Image (cartoon, rainbow, N blue to C red):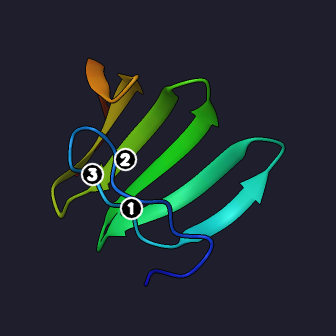
Amino acid sequence: MPPADTPASDAHGFTPGPTLASSEGMQLIEVDAGRFRLEFGGGLGLEVILLFSRSVAFWRWGGELVAEVNVGVG
């Protein structure tokens, strides 16, 4: 059984890791090494992937990708 702070998988099969930080409905979740998700509540989230050459952020709404943004180029 997962720890109490680990939500179950969503409708898309995403099973997040433990919550790293939480404040007033916001949660920072480490999805896996170099990949983090910031959940704002109400279905809005920002997922950041840290790569060797660049970093990419994805805005998500209700589990669906709505925008991709390059946040760093190495």
To which quarter of the image does residue 68 belong?
Answer: top left
Q: In which quadrant will I find the N terminus?
A: bottom left
Residue 11: percent from the left, percent from the top? 27, 38
Q: Residue at x 45, y 35 (%)?
A: 46
Task: Tell me, yes or no, if residue 70 can be seen here.
Answer: yes
Seen at 41% across and 59% down, the residue is 8
Q: Amino acid at mark 1?
A: Pro
**Label 1 environment density (alpha carbons within 10 Å; few <14, some 14–19, many ≥20):** some
Query: Which residue corresponds to mark 3?
Result: 14
Q: Is residue 14 left or right of residue 59?
A: left
Q: Is residue 53 above or below residue 5?
A: above
C-alpha span from label 2 to label 3: 15 Å
In contact (CB < 8 Å): disc 1 and disc 2: no
Q: What is the CA distance from the residue labelled 3 to the residue labelled 1?
A: 6 Å
For the question of whether residue 68 can be seen, the reply is no
- Residue 59 sits above or below residue 34 on the image: above
In the rendered structure, find residue 16 and report the number of the disc placed on it: 1
- Where residue 58 appears, x then y in whole percent? 32, 31
State the image coordinates of residue 20 (x, y, percent, origin top left): 61, 70
Identity of the amino acid at label 2? Val
Whichever of labels 1 and 2 marks the residue nearer the N terminus, that label is 1
Q: Report the number of numbered marks.
A: 3
Which residue is under mark 2? 48
Sequence-wise, the earlier of marks 2 and 3 is 3
